[in-house]
Image: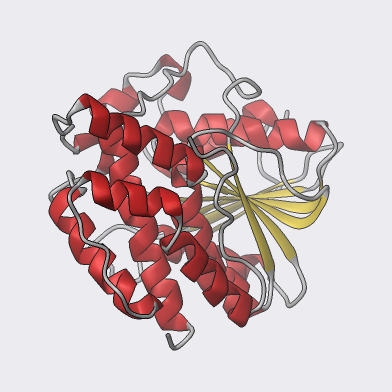
Amino acid sequence: MHVQPVPLPTGEPAAVLDGVARWITSAPLRDLVAAFDGRWPGGDSPTLLAWLDAFSAAHWDFRSGNERPDAREPDLDPDVAAVVEESAAALGMVAAKPPPRRDYRHVVVLGGLAQACLRRTAYAAHLLHRGTVATEIGLLGSLRPLSPAERALPAVNGCTNEADVLDLGVRRSFGVEGPVDTDTAPDGSWFVRTYRPADGPRVLVLAAPSSEPGVRRADTTDTQRFWAGRAGLTKGDRVLVVTAPIYVPFQHCDAVRTLGLPYGCAVDTVGVDPRLADDDALPEPVLTPGRYLQEIRSAIRSMRLLTAALGG
């Protein structure tokens, strides 16, 4: 059984490419491909990523174009399911780990389902209360309407979209009553709310616009780029991204591509530790082998985009 998680790519462009190569040729990923009767190909990183993208589309894609909560769960052989769970753990998708540093310029909380928005916001506040130092906090969401299941959560308290849930989380976890400033698009496609807690850094809650309005809602790349412009991200800034452990590999690589490389920033990504951001009103998601496979595929696709951005 693999114990030490495979490191994620970070640093300067050459180090990023080396990190991608290390992750996609790691023993846990090879074991996983073998469990699905895949024959490991030769070739450089772009060639291998293209093969892994196609292989994962055939074997590990259960969304069929739908949102994550609507993905089907595959019926896997127990031995295969065990390999999936061991590989996911070794690829850094199961256990939460603390930030590798104590000081950051920015802490960025990624949005998601309503319960995730509240849990991640609470965890960011916990990190600050326990000694993580930051100049500014950014909570990155969109105007995605909440599903009926999300709206039914008592903790959501009447919110109608993802960004409003992040806003609610800030008021609860950072002890603020209202924003000191609000900037809203004339057409209502985005907003930025600024909070100034009495004993902490400035907090921005952002509902980002889509880069393809009328086609799709804002995605992770849209929210990160919108935030970077509003936050005045500059070379040398250190950024800590907060998400869920299962999403750490793919969202870390997205952040390196959209923030780290173009702005010259150092990016670390951590998953919420549910023991430190627990709320009985928020149901903990059930993480299944199918969900891990889906997000390993997401990581592969994110690394493919990252490699392409570096000319690989």
Q: Residue at x 65, y 62 (%)?
A: 267
**Of residues 103 and 92, the one drawn nearer to the viewer in this rendering:** 92
Residue 54: name its quadrant: bottom left
Residue 201 appears in the rendering:
yes
**Colour treatment of the image:** secondary structure
Residue 234: name its quadrant: bottom right
Compared to residue 77, the image places residue 49 above or below, namely below
Q: Residue at x 75, y 68 (%)?
A: 237
Number of dots carrying numbers: 0
Residue 230: name its quadrant: bottom right
Q: Residue 199, image x and y in percent?
A: 87, 37
Q: Residue at x 74, y 36 (%)?
A: 127
Residue 184 appears in the rendering:
no
Q: Residue at x 62, y 66 (%)?
A: 10
Q: Is residue 29 left or right of residue 18?
A: left
Compared to residue 92, the image places residue 286 above or below, namely above
Seen as rendered, the residue at the extreme top is: 280
Seen as rendered, the residue at the extreme bottom is: 311
Q: Quadrant of the C terminus?
A: bottom left
Q: Residue 63, image x and y in percent?
A: 18, 45
Q: Residue 242, image x and y in percent?
A: 59, 45
**Of residues 30 and 172, the one drawn nearer to the viewer in this rendering:** 30
Q: Is residue 47 left or right of residue 207?
A: left
Q: Residue 218, image x and y in percent?
A: 36, 59
